[in-house]
Image (cartoon, rainbow, N blue to C red):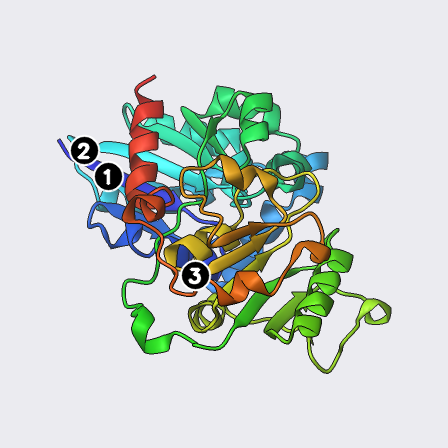
Amino acid sequence: MVKKIFILGNGTDWNEKCLQKMISNQNIYFINKRVPVDGNIKNKLARIYFSYKINNKIDMPFKILWYRNIKKFIKKNTNSEDKIVVLIYDHNVFGGEISFLNYLRKNFKDIKLSYIFTNIVKYTSAMEKNYVKNLNIWYDAVFAFDPKDAQKYNFAYSPLIYDADPNYQKEKVENKDNLVFYVGQAKDRLESILECFKKLKKLGIKTDFHIVNVKKEEMKYVNEIVYNKFITYQDAINSIQNATCLIDIIQKDSTGLTIKTCEAICYDKKLITTNKHIADYPFYDPKYIRIIESADNIDEEFFYQNKDVHFSKESKRYFSAECFLERLEKELKK
């Protein structure tokens, strides 16, 4: 008997890059579309058909026509003896469709279903579409990104699944000069991000900052910070690999480990973070990770001491697909 895992992603390029090692497994299959159908026309129709605004007023009929694509894909890659697990990421439109989940259970004996968050529940599709309270009923395992959310909603906890690019060779791309990289949305943290930039500039540390969703009147240092320009996650990885330090200003309600923490650990980079909870994790090392309350806590010494950054294999494994699959197996056995 072989276990086959099918992942319905959230449609982002970073989702695919994070799972690169995981989906290289011959028994793991990945469909990285928020609306998992083939063809541009079908995709546009499906987006309309599964629109929350429409379905909030009327439950659209004949959704089974869209579900069949997934059934065919699973059947094509399995036989009757295989154990089947389906992982659905938050923001995939099928994740909140109980009719879809029932359809899978009807067509595949003993199938297991799991839901994965990549943000605090407050800012997720499950919250927006009001099905958070149903997840423990609908799914066999639900993984929260944030430990507080896991406790609040009685979900299992898992950090983001993250493995470094297998082709990465640190010695070939490492920048010997101090260079701090940041990319992310402004959200509720723009002021803090700009204060950090200002402090780094004062210390003479090179920066590479990219901030999106910023109003024109809120932009500062416009000749030194890149605003509102999309970069692919591959471009972000290239910049991460070339940097010596990453900066992580978390959302005010969050206690979870952001993707910037994963990147710093897996690519052996220093990290400046406002997440005080990071000190509770086994990979925390004050030589490489500086916890700050404000930009005033950033000092020159952190950049010039312990420049040869090496996190242990076990630290990197904490975020790995291998470790997640162990967590998944444990939860599904409950």
Residues at marks 2 and 1 touching, judged by CB atoms closer than 8 Å: yes
Q: Which mark is residue 60?
A: none
Callout 1 amino acid = Lys
Relative horizontal placement of residue 277, taking residue 306 as reference (left or right): right
As measured in the structure, the alpha-carbon distance from the residue carrying label 2 to the one carrying label 1 is 7 Å
Determine which residue is flagged by label 3.
Answer: 306
Of the two numbered discs 1 and 3 on the same chain, state the one appearing first in sequence. Answer: 1
Number of residues whose C-alpha sits closer than 10 Å to that of mark 2, classed few (under 14), some (14–19) or many (20 or more): some
Callout 2 amino acid = Asp
Number of residues whose C-alpha sits closer than 10 Å to that of mark 3, classed few (under 14), some (14–19) or many (20 or more): few
The outermost residue toward the bottom is 223
Where residue 291 sits: x, y (%)?
Answer: 59, 48
Q: Nearer the viewer, residue 127 or 297?
A: 297
Q: Report the quarter where the N terminus lies.
A: top left
Res 27 seen here:
yes
Relative horizontal placement of residue 29, taking residue 246 as reference (left or right): left
For image coordinates 20% across by 40% down, the residue present is 78
As measured in the structure, the alpha-carbon distance from the residue carrying label 1 to the one carrying label 3 is 44 Å
Where residue 22 sits: x, y (%)?
Answer: 29, 50
For image coordinates 28% across by 68% down, the residue present is 167
Determine which residue is flagged by label 1.
Answer: 4
Q: Which mark is residue 82?
A: 2
Task: Find numbered disc 2 in the image and state the secondary structure of the residue it sits on.
Answer: loop
Of the two numbered discs 2 and 3 on the same chain, state the one appearing first in sequence. Answer: 2
Callout 3 amino acid = Asn
As measured in the structure, the alpha-carbon distance from the residue carrying label 2 to the one carrying label 3 is 49 Å
